[in-house]
Amino acid sequence: MNPFAVLFNKLIYRSILRHQLQRVGDRFRLGYSSELLQPHFFSIGNNFFTGPHCYLSTNAFSPVQIGNDVMFGPYCKLIGGNHDYTYTKGALALNELPRAEQKEILIENGVWVGACTVILTGAHIGEGAVIGAMGLVNHFVPPYTIAVGVPAKRFFSRFTDDRDLEELLSNIGSRYTVEMIKRVQKTHAVQSRRG
């Protein structure tokens, strides 16, 4: 690792980004050789961390909201925006997406994104969810589940005991209740995790 590059990332690049982000909380940490493009379309909460070599980019058509206590493993990508592939007035790069097709990327509090995961427009990752390494997320992931696959469609509950989940929700001041989480998990066919 180039010591100058590490110093540049920690002291200069992060400082510049903090002033360009739409909103940023305390303890914003961007890993070595990571990039965050179009920062004015990102809103990031407290205690955000990425591992090295992450790439985060979006545009006005796909704003990004990231909650508190979110961490990304190394080599993750978050890519917002899309193109209307039926566009006929010129090159795809020149078209604008119709308003009805514009979707944000929402990552709630306490999410852990595994290494080499790709997050795309339309992703909504619920509170406390874990995305398995090398996953692809472009839709809703229920809170407190483990999601795996390309795309991430297989969901497993993080907790086998409601008391453990209830204790965590109480300790972090979650807006969810155990009943709310169980209802959402049932709707999305979340499987029980075997201990």
Image (cartoon, rainbow, N blue to C red):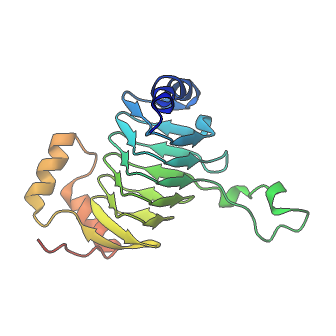
Residue sitting at x 50%, y 41%: 33
- Who is closer to the viewer here, 33 or 18? 33
Asked if residue 179 lies left or right of residue 184, the reply is left
Residue sitting at x 34%, y 64%: 132
Image height of 161 relative to 2, above or below: below
- Who is closer to the viewer here, 62 or 149? 149
Q: Quadrant of the C terminus?
A: bottom left
Residue 47 found in image quarter: top left
The x, y position of residue 4, in whole percent, is 50, 28
Q: Quadrant of the N terminus?
A: top left
The x, y position of residue 179, in whole percent, is 21, 61
Image height of 154 relative to 58, above or below: below
- Farthest residue in the front direction? 2
Image height of 26 relative to 166, above or below: above
Residue 185 found in image quarter: bottom left
Asked if residue 97 lies left or right of residue 35, the reply is right
The x, y position of residue 110, in whole percent, is 30, 47
Asked if residue 107 lies left or right of residue 37, the reply is left
- Who is closer to the viewer here, 106 or 94? 94
The x, y position of residue 78, in whole percent, is 53, 53
Residue sitting at x 56%, y 40%: 36
Number of numbered discs: 0
- Farthest residue in the right direction? 89
Residue 19 found in image quarter: top right
Residue sitting at x 39%, y 63%: 141
